[in-house]
Image: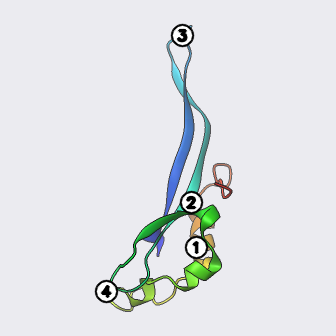
């Protein structure tokens, strides 16, 4: 399941003209979900978290994918658990 939840990073690269040093500002990431309709990986698409729904999660094809049985469940709760465990809260943007 964790391979189906990724991230879209966002940040500003800032160059200090006086010192020539570069740093990052406004660092954040938005979760993304890889979705397909059935075990044949048909109609593959990537959704930002803000556009994904519990209904889409319930219809995900991962429980039917080959090899069968590796990921028998996929749900909105599993997605949120993956995000909670792997995306530091200070960088997490769920509204994009």
Q: Residues within 10 Å of mark 4 (few under 14, many from 20)?
A: few
Dot 1 surroundings within 10 Å: few (below 14), some, or many (20 or more)?
many
Name the disc covering residue 31, or none: 2
Tag 3 residue: 19
Q: Which residue is mark 4?
A: 66
Query: Disc 4, disc 1: CB below 8 Å?
Result: no
- Which numbered disc flags the more N-terminal residue, 4 or 1? 4
Residue 75 seen in this snapshot: no
Q: CA distance from mark 2 to mark 4?
A: 25 Å
Closer-to-camera residue (32/69) = 32
Contact between marks 1 and 2 (CB within 8 A): the answer is yes
| CA separation in Å, label 1 and label 2 | 10 Å
Q: Earlier in the sequence, mark 2 or mark 4?
A: 2
Residue contact between numbered discs 3 and 2, judged by CB atoms under 8 Å? no
Q: Which tag, 4 or 3, sits closer to the chain's start?
A: 3
The answer to whether the residue labelled 4 contacts the one labelled 3, judged by CB atoms less than 8 Å apart, is no
Dot placed on the residue nearer the N-terminal end, 3 or 1: 3
Q: Quadrant of the C terminus?
A: bottom right
Distance from the alpha carbon under mark 4 to that under mark 1: 20 Å
Between disc 1 and disc 2, whose residue precedes?
2
Element marked by disc 3: loop
In the displayed structure, would residue 73 be above or below residue 3?
A: below
The numbered mark, 3 or 2, whose residue comes first in the sequence reads: 3
User: Residue 79 shows which numbered tag?
Assistant: 1
**What residue do we see at 53% from left, 62% from top?**
32
Disc 2 residue crowd, few under 14, some 14–19, many 20+, Cα 10 Å: many
Q: What residue lies at 36% left-to-right and 79% top-to-bottom?
A: 42
Residue at image point 58% right, 54% down: 30
Q: Which mark is residue 63?
A: none
């Amino acid at each position: 399941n964790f391979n189906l939840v990724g991230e879209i990073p966002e940040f500003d690269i800032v160059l200090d003209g006086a010192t020539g040093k570069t740093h990052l500002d406004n660092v954040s990431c938005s979760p993304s979900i890889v979705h397909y309709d059935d075990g044949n990986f048909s109609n593959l698409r990537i959704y930002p978290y803000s556009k994904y729904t519990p209904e889409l999660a319930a219809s995900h094809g991962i429980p039917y994918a080959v090899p069968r049985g590796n990921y028998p469940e996929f749900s909105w709760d599993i997605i949120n658990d993956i995000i909670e465990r792997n995306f530091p809260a200070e960088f997490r943007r769920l509204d994009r």
